[in-house]
Image (cartoon, rainbow, N blue to C red):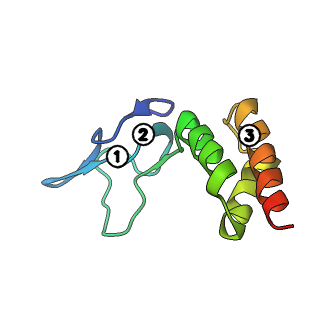
């Protein structure tokens, strides 16, 4: 994998001995934590993969309807802006937060 590359669920991210590490979710490789041939042990991070922008946007749209108090902290993170996320995600986060707060009244 290379930084900036997009991965789908099941994409091979790394091989550690005979074990293949595959992405569970779609997203973009933000950083590689180890170099080829480096020694790793269980629990070591080998790569940072960002959340897929479209999945975040769709999740925020769903939370607009069903979101609750438990979701507010994570939504606020997107209201403040997350590097690499498009403006539409920040706008949807704001609308979602407002909808949840309106349901609390």
The answer to which image quadrant residue 82 occupies is top right
Mark 2 vs mark 3: which is more N-terminal? 2
Per the image, the residue denoted by label 3 is: 92
Q: In the depicted view, which residue is nearer to us: 30 or 71?
A: 71
Q: CA distance from mark 2 to mark 3?
A: 20 Å
Farthest residue to the right: give it.
105
Between label 1 and label 2, give the one nearer the viewer: 2
Query: Do tag 1 and tag 2 residues touch (Cβ < 8 Å)?
Result: yes
Q: CA distance from mark 1 to mark 3?
A: 26 Å
Residue at position x 68%, y 60% from top? Answer: 74
What numbered label is drawn on residue 23?
1
Q: Viewed as shown, does residue 44 lie left or right of 98? A: left
Residue at position x 34%, y 46% from top? Answer: 23
Residue at position x 47%, y 38% from top? Answer: 27
Badge 3 crowding class, 10 Å Cα cut-off, few under 14, some 14 to 19, many 20 or more, is: many
* The N terminus sits in image quarter: top left
Q: In the depicted view, which residue is nearer to us: 27 or 71?
A: 71
Badge 1 crowding class, 10 Å Cα cut-off, few under 14, some 14 to 19, many 20 or more, is: some
Between label 1 and label 3, give the one nearer the viewer: 3
Per the image, the residue denoted by label 2 is: 26
Whole-percent x, y for residue 71 in the image: 67, 63
Q: In the depicted view, which residue is nearer to us: 18 or 96?
A: 96
Q: Is 44 situated above or below 29?
A: below
Whole-percent x, y for residue 89 in the image: 70, 37
Mark 1 vs mark 3: which is more N-terminal? 1
Query: Do tag 1 and tag 3 residues touch (Cβ < 8 Å)?
Result: no
Q: CA distance from mark 1 to mark 2?
A: 7 Å
């Amino acid at each position: 994998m290379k930084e900036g590359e997009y991965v789908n669920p099941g994409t091979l991210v790394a091989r550690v001995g005979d074990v293949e590490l595959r992405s569970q979710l779609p997203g973009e490789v933000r950083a590689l934590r180890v170099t080829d041939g480096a020694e790793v042990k269980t629990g070591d991070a080998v790569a940072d993969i960002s959340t897929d922008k479209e999945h975040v946007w769709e999740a925020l749209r769903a939370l607009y309807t069903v979101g609750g108090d438990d979701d507010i902290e994570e939504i606020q993170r997107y209201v403040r802006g997350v590097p690499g996320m498009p403006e539409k995600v920040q706008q949807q986060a704001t609308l979602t937060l407002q909808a949840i707060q309106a349901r609390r009244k």
